[in-house]
Image (cartoon, coloured by chain):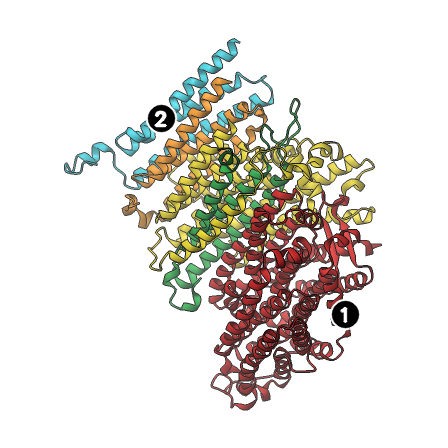
Chain colours: A orange, B cyan, C yellow, D green, E red
Amino acid sequence: MLALAATSIAILSVMALALARALRADTVYDRILGVNMFGTKTALFIAVMGFLSGRPDFLDIAIVYALINFIGMVAVLRFFEYTATDDTQNNKESS
Amino acid sequence: MILETLSTLFLVLGAFFSFTGVIGLFKFPDFFTRVHAASVTDSIATILIIFGLILRTDFGLVAVKLLFILIFMLLTSPTASHALAKSARHGGLLTLAETRAPKKEDND
Amino acid sequence: MAEFIDLVLLGMLAITALRVIFLKDLFAVVMLFGIYSFLSALIFVNLDAVDVAFTEASVGAGISTVLMLGTLALTGRKEKTSNHPALLPLLVVGVTGAALIYGSLDMPPFGDPNNPAHQHVAPRYIEDSPQEIGLPNMVTSVLASYRAFDTLGETAVVFAAAIGVLSLLGLPKRDRQAIESGLKSHLVLRVVAKLIIPLTILFALYVQFHGDYGPGGGFQAGVIAAAAIILYALVLGLPMATHVVQPALLKTLAALGVLIYAGTGVANFFLGGNFLDYNMLASDPVAGQHIGIILIELGVGITVFAAMLSIFYAFAGQAERTNIQ
Amino acid sequence: MSFIVDYYNYWIVVFLMMAGFYIVISANNLVKKIVGLNIFQTSVFMMYISIGKVSGGSAPIVAEGITTYSNPLPHVLILTAIVVGVATTAVGLALVVRIKRAYGTVEENEFEDKEDLI
Amino acid sequence: MLEQHFPVLPIVLPLMAAPICILLGRSQLAWLFATLISGLSFFISVALLLTTLDQGVLSYALGGWEPPWGIEMRIDVASALVLCVVTGISSLVLVYAKESIAKEIDRSQHTLFYAAHLLCLTGLSGILSTGDAFNLFVFLEISSLATYTLVSLASDKRCLTAAFRYLVMGTIGATFILIGVGMMYMKTGTLNMIDLAARIAEFDGNRTVNTGLAFILVGVSIKLALFPLHMWLPPAYTHAPSAVSAFLASTATKVAVYVMVRFIFTIYGAEYVFYTMSMDIILLVLAIVAIFKCSFMATVQSNVKTVLAFSSVAQIGYMILGISLVSSAGLMAGLLHIFNHALMKGALFMAVGAVFLRTGSVDIKAFQGLGRQMPLTMAAFAIAGLSIIGVPLTAGFVSKWYLVTAALEQQHWIIAFLVLIGSLFAIVYIGRILEAAYFQKPSEITEEKDIKEAPLLMLVPMWILVLANIYFGIETSVSVSAADAASQWLTQPTATMGAAQ
């Protein structure tokens, strides 16, 4: 139980750090990278949390997270392809 | 008992690799090395943590679902990173070596 | 432990929300909104609302984000600085927030089992629904039987949204020759996506029919199935997707789903029950409930799948059209 | 002290609601308004789910060995409300796309006619 | 055999008809079908009104689950009365819509228009019939979403920004209602209105319950366009297609007024809202400001639809004024005005739609000289306009009369006087248009074209409403007794309401 709790807290802090990356990023791509990492870690976090609360049968949600994370990434890439023409100069953000 | 110890080991290792990955996200000098850090550790951490969890199940439906998640994430996560790096390359992002070569004064 | 996780997640949410206020890059705003949605779904899991988390993750982080990105592709990425003073909004928000804090002072304590909300109506759902309906998932029981009329309304809302978007943007025509477009240069992505899509559809079917026993149900299944086709369209291009699932078919499907749901309800008139009273559908009330719930979940699933996908088609069709010009 | 433990959840949720509400009424860009609307609504959903939580309870799906379940009713309500939210978002975004095509801008302060202000 | 299911039919019929309209695919067929279904709902509503006048209240347990565990449809005289107005106007508007949208809406979108109209009707009937606070929110959103769609269907590009503004405001309003319902649920554990009423009575002065009430009232005020929150209404009604303006102006805000009445009188109890929280003063002031500000705004507009839209906001002020008088007579005047205002605004917007069909403009200049060119349409406009002003022998006079009497009954001389002053504004803004129509030469918009009278399918529903205006202005017993019964029912203590179950 302790190992699960420790793991969940560890993943939670990794999520927080990835979030920090996504909030403050030098380039758009870094931001996306942070978001992606956040997404995968969230899916893991849900899996661990299911065990921690003694109801591991809710892993379906983790699957949804992984799936949606992937679709989100593809959508972002597609967005870049689409706006590529006017966007190459604006990679550096002024956030 | 052995299973639980093994599982704990896996989980702790997985958590450790997650940490290294996210530290890489902050510390590495250019985007491509950061992608590298993030995606490699992502995969190994996923494998370790999911295996650690599987060892705690009674190897029924839950274990199958965990395996499904594992396969799913092993397929999607590196693909996403790869596509992102490729897209960044197309988008005109340069590696550290390339940024240093033409302009020395730019210490980004 | 649950409280601690709750607090950390809420903190992350607060920071994300603050960042969204000040960011001018709309693309980043949308990405952060995706994170916001993911985080709130995590909070839902943590507060035991697994079905809600399921929906929020697939709808908020999935469909909404994709639609927002589609809109941004058409409207541009940067928010211009506004020149009107932000004093009035601050005042309105301040007053509203103060009212809410004032109202929270007499709220029942968070998580206390003796709260009125846990004492009056809900105990019946928790204690009797497994016998009355025969399903372990109480959320499904309440959703599809006790409060099935709400869910019928929800299906109508989705249908109304599809009608609204179609009337505003129109559906793309089905292309004669399906040309692969989309993310042409990403070979790995295309291969992996082709692997993932059948898995996703399988998963959607599982969610549809396992919703009585675990988290999930018609709504979530519909969204996930739509997400599979959306992934296909994103990777291989809209023309390919319209070849697989035709836009005209979607309109029919969306209408059909609503009719299945309402028709199940009306069928009970002729069996001597009230609207949506499934007890009459079989000789045994519990079996009748089960048949009724399967039917209406099917209706919800079909409508949601068709409505979500046609909404996506409408947005993607717009993007495609401007791309050609 | 117990006061804070009892209510911290609601207070943070109120803060989130107000952040979303502020974005809705102050944002200049119509897409951002819709994002704000979503944040506002999602936070209200969190308030409902907080109502349904029972300390020490578990998800309302019958399983062996579990005696306390959280309240399923708010979950059902919020499932419906989430769907309503996404429906509104879809129609709102479709309107934004059309506005962009008709006016050439989605910035509130760039509409020429004062009548068109949102 | 179907009679026992009547309470749910006005919701289920249009709900099922909307997808069938999409499946039919042809504009003509969809029109015929939608009109038939709407007419059927109207007859069911009339039957419901007769039953409720007789029996008091009808309760229908959906899914066979007894309330508060299941959702209850609960129809009393007040809801049946407004239900009759909504379904009746909907049927007339649908008859009218065929010719009207042929010009204003692209042909490919006709089936979508009918489907959206039916969904809007579903939502409005649902709001009126339901006895469950959350179910009310769901139906509110069905009707709102359908309304945004309907408004945005017009060909003028300004309908888009109008619809967007409506969407943002409407969603904020709905979310406020959601917050309020959540706070009530938190304290009581129930969502059924009767059950809520019984339980809320125990929480006198509770801060959470008070805040919940405040949020619900603000949310509903947005939906009913009560004075400072009315900004979405004038553009939405101005730029929507004519048939949509006619339908919305005479139903949507009225249903929101009904929701406010329901929350104040049935759930919280008039005593609590008015005496404990002194909401009556706030509502009274807002209503009077609405009457004057918006009547004045109506006099300076050049777009006739905008004139009527501002007039609508002012008329809503009269309804709220009636409610805030805190008496059975005042409430009765408010309810009566819901009924009568639907008749007059429906007729006015229909007439303006006919003018738009023939002249292509709704500017006041387009009306110049129309008295001769479109005599039937302008006669309808004139009679309905007189009704807005409150000239005797029209329906508008009856409701103003009862409003003034209700004010005088409580010695509120000033309020009675202000109501009469408000009517003077109505004389100005309606008079301007009538003057243009009857005493001015055709302007450049109309003189070159050969303007014909409106087609029969538009004139018939318009004149049905106009004749109803006159009928209910002379033969007041039907409408007044229904409104009276409704207000008696609403103002009785809630405890007896539960007993009547």
D11 and E281: which is toward the camera: E281
Residue D63 image position (x, y, % from top left): 65, 25
**Disc 2 marks which residue?**
B21
Within 10 Å of disc 2 (Cα), the crowding (few <14, some 14-19, many 20+) is many
Residue E433 image position (x, y, % from top left): 54, 83
Left or right, residue A30 beside residue C11 = left
| Disc 1 and disc 2 on one polypeptide chain | no
B37 and E419: which is toward the camera: E419
* Mark linked to residue E481: 1
Left or right, residue E202 beside residue E43 = left
In the rendered structure, which amino acid carries the disc numbered 2?
Gly
E17 and C273: which is toward the camera: C273
Number of numbered callouts drawn: 2
C36 and C192: which is toward the camera: C36
Residue C160 image position (x, y, % from top left): 59, 54
Q: Secondary structure at mark 1?
A: helix
Looking at the rendered image, the disc whose residue lies closer to the viewer, 1 or 2, is 1
- Residue drawn at (62%, 51%), measured in percent from left and top? E138
In the rendered structure, which amino acid carries the disc numbered 1?
Ser
